[in-house]
Amino acid sequence: MNIQIFGKSKCFDTKKAERYFSERRIKYQYIDINEKSMSRGEFQNVKKALGGLDKMIDMDAPDQDGLLLIKYAKDEDKEEKLFLSQKYLVTPIVRNGKQATAGYCPDLWKTWREE
């Protein structure tokens, strides 16, 4: 498995995801999206794996004004706004190759097998 965890240092669910993989001795790479954003390719792969952009948006983000700018943007602008402001993503985003989850999803992670 090639696990990547995109999260935020102060996110409780991100810490739980790191603990989940650590306890099972599964190596992972942690990326703090507040310091280093996802590349456009990673962003597109996650969007595709999750089945759409709306599943990536954190509706409970602290900055509700900025969130509204993304939420009610025209469809053609919404993706670019979210890509440029990744602090509005649900965390953790956990990738395993072409598979991805948004949020704490241990039931899905345990179905992932070596590729």
Image: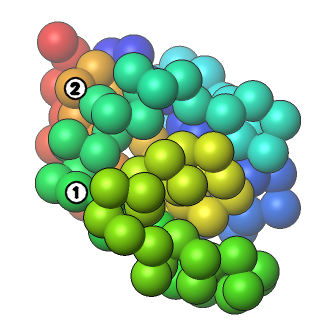
Packing grade of label 2 (10 A; few <14, some 14-19, many >=20) is few
Q: In this picture, is 59 found above or below 113? A: below
Query: Residue 87 appears in which quarter of the rendering?
Result: bottom right
Q: Position of residue 82 (x, y in %)?
A: 53, 55
Res. 115 mark: none
User: Regarding mark 1 in the picture, which secondary structure is present there?
Assistant: loop
The N terminus sits in image quarter: top left
Dot placed on the residue nearer the N-terminal end, 2 or 1: 1
The C terminus sits in image quarter: top left
Q: In this picture, is 71 found above or below 75? A: below
Residue at which label 2 appears = 98
Q: Is residue 60 visible?
A: yes
Depth check, front residue: 77 or 108: 77
Residue at 16% in and 54% down = 51
Residue at 29% in and 31% down = 45
Q: CA distance from mark 2 to mark 1?
A: 14 Å
Amino acid type, mark 1: Gly
Depth check, front residue: 27 or 23: 27
Residue at which label 1 appears = 52
Packing grade of label 1 (10 A; few <14, some 14-19, many >=20) is few
User: Closer to us: mark 2 or mark 1?
Assistant: 1
Q: Would you say 98 lies left or right of 8 here?
A: left
Depth check, front residue: 59 or 71: 71
Q: In this picture, is 78 found above or below 100? A: below
Q: Position of residue 114 (x, y in %)?
A: 20, 16
Number of numbered discs present? 2
Q: Is residue 17 visible?
A: no
User: Regarding mark 2 in the picture, which secondary structure is present there?
Assistant: loop
